[in-house]
Amino acid sequence: MSFKKAYSAGYLGIVPYELALKLQRRLMQARAEDNIPDVLLLLQHPSVFTIGQFRGEEDLIAPAETLTQEGIAVFHTNRGGGITYHGPGQLVGYPILNLKESSLGVREYIWRLEEVAIKSLLALGIQGRRVAKYPGVWVGEKKICSIGIHVSHYITTHGFALNVSNDLRYFEYIRPCGLGCDVMTSLSESLGHPVEVETIIGSLLHSFSETFGLRCKQGDGKWLAILDALSG
């Protein structure tokens, strides 16, 4: 399949959540001004709970002293959805896309993010599915990929979180997206053996390119340089 329009993709390793927010804001502004193409940032975060713009705080069920002992930060964000957990072993994707240029509405955009995860899972022999009223992707009766986005002036931020080999114990401290704490699963749990995040990046980029009709252009070094500047 041949695609004319390119997007820049980069895997950044483990990035503190606050720093990733700063990078997204900078790229969102640059994309709105048409100074950069569409971007897909792939990364992991140190352990952190994030709360959606309109709800989620009531679903943080662990006491504050437990969070302090575990060293887990809590961030309020401007994305949709409720509370979720990010941590090492989870592949997070932040697309910075111009929806107007791609002729996409918000609902179709979310559908395509789900499709990216479903295709990536299928490449590993896992049948993912959608569940009405709960954005994200499920394997059987458990959720494996969460989605929460923000759109401003047609530019997207935030995105998806695919559980690969992250410690699912941390979901016991919350009701993820208002669901039961035992609802989450991962690639490693589904397959019955450990899976490293880095091993699925190629498959996910292929799925993203195919689903959005875009050509991937690697840009890891560029985004890492900006990260270094933001952290300085």
Image (cartoon, rainbow, N blue to C red):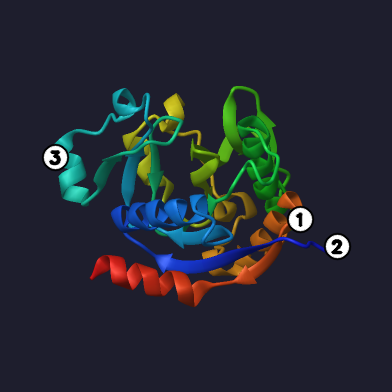
Counting from the top left corner in percent of width and height, residue 81 is at: 45, 30
Image quadrant of residue 65? Answer: top left
Q: Nearer the viewer, mark 2 or mark 3?
A: 2
- Quick one: label 3 or label 1, which is nearer the N terminus? 3
Q: CA distance from mark 2 to mark 3?
A: 53 Å
Residue 224 spot, x, y in % from top left: 41, 72
Circle 2 crowding by C-alpha within 10 Å: few under 14, some 14–19, many from 20: few
Give the residue drawn at x 53%, y 62%: 36
Circles 2, 1 touching at the beta carbon (< 8 Å): yes
Query: Which numbered disc flags the more N-terminal residue, 2 or 3?
Result: 2
The numbered dot on residue 1 is 2
Q: Nearer the viewer, residue 181 or 9?
A: 9
Write down the residue under mark 3.
65
Q: Is residue 105 above or below residue 198?
A: above
Residue 193 in which image quadrant: bottom right
Amino acid carrying label 1: it is Glu
Counting other residues with Cα less than 10 Å from the Cα at mark 3, is it few (<14), some (14-19), or many (20 or more)?
few
Separation of disc 3 and disc 1 at Cα? 45 Å
Tell me, yes or no, whether the two marked residues, 2 and 3, touch with CB atoms within 8 Å: no
Q: Quadrant of residue 154?
A: top right
Q: Is residue 12 visible?
A: yes
Is 135 above or below relative to 155?
above
Q: Which residue is mark 1?
A: 210
Residue 56 screen position, x and y as percent:
35, 27
Residue type at mark 3: give it. Glu
Q: CA distance from mark 2 to mark 1?
A: 8 Å
User: Is the residue marked by circle 1 packed among few (<14), some (14-19), or many (20+) residues within 10 Å?
Assistant: some
Kindly state the secondary structure of the residue where label 3 is placed: helix
